[in-house]
Image (cartoon, grey):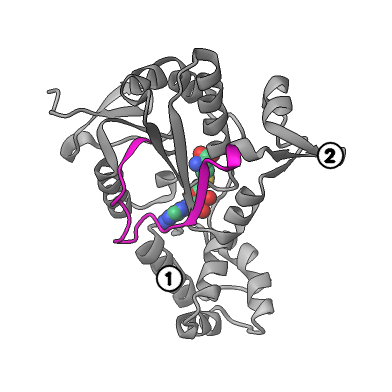
Amino acid sequence: MIRLKEEEFAEIVEYMRQNYGINLEKKKTLIECRMSKELEKQGVETFGRYMELLKKDTSGTIASNMVSRLTTNYTYFMREQAHFNILRDHILPELSKNHSRGFLNVWCAGCSTGEECYTIAMILQDYRERTGNLMNYRILATDISNQVLDKARKGIYTAKEAEALPAEWKNKYFRAEGTKSYCVDERLKQNIRFQNQNLLSPGIGTEQFDLIFCRNVMIYFDKKAKETLVKKLEAGLKPEGYLVIGHAELLNRGEIQLEPVFPAVYKKYKEKQR
Ligand SMILES: C[S@@+](CC[C@H](N)C(=O)[O-])C[C@H]1O[C@@H](n2cnc3c(N)ncnc32)[C@H](O)[C@@H]1O
């Protein structure tokens, strides 16, 4: 394993913080473990030399590889299931009142390998079929890591990864790939656009959504990046829209117009409620 010198460690921490908001201050060993192979691939023996190459690389490939290695992409189907029950029982009945003829615009920010946006799509599809509500939907699923987006786009999961899904959904929304994996059906895929997007980039936040899921992303951010992100999420919500964050995350509501309506679920009211 290639060791990090203190000044190299500081440089990487600062680079990741400034460009992606990710706080790696206490993750020296993680950087060494996850990046050593990447350094070998580039044929360099020190992190200092690697960062020189990264800064010269106008294609952005080296930076993209580093980000893919240093982000935490842990996710699974039906994660924090209480949110999906709230979506089914409260949010969708509310939102569908205004959208019975239009479409529901959903953003899954920090979608990782796709389990979260496909779970949302199954809930929406199921809701339509159960209630006869003809509301259409489209989901924008974004992440900073190309590696996870490749897997998300393919939509192929092992039996173990698909374990948490009800058998009925596995039959309905997946087709078996051999004996050991499941592939997401086109019916779900056609409603989802996957995009590489840095949540801290100035360009984002122009489109407006009825529903945003951004769970377990800001938990890795430093305070300033978190504040920037929350403002973008708020701006990206239509009035009466909902924001869902991770149960371990908390919004400082001082400066924003979002009211908590369920645990880790916020609503953007037209006017401030307090
Ligand atoms: C722990 S996963 C959470 C996945 C899913 N939302 C869930 O709750 O299961 C966090 C994801 O956020 C992505 N991420 C981290 N920083 C980001 C940034 N600045 N812009 C976009 N995505 C980012 C990571 O690549 C990772 O896939």
Q: CA distance from mark 1 to mark 2?
A: 43 Å
Residue 180's disc number? 2
Residue 175 picture quarter:
top right
Nearer-the-camera pick, 145 or 222: 145
Three-letter code, disc 1: Ala
Q: Is residue 39 left or right of residue 204?
A: right
Three-letter code, disc 2: Lys
Quarter of the image where the N terminus is located: bottom right
Q: Position of residue 211 (x, y in %)?
A: 37, 34
Specify the segment rendered in magenta. Answer: 188-211
Tell me the mark number nearer the camera, choosing from 1 and 2.
Answer: 2
Image point (43%, 33%), residue name: 248
Image point (61%, 68%), residue name: 35
The kind of secondary structure element at disc 1 is helix
Image point (41%, 38%), residue name: 106
Q: Is residue 81 above or below residue 235?
A: above
Q: Which residue is identified by label 1? A: 10
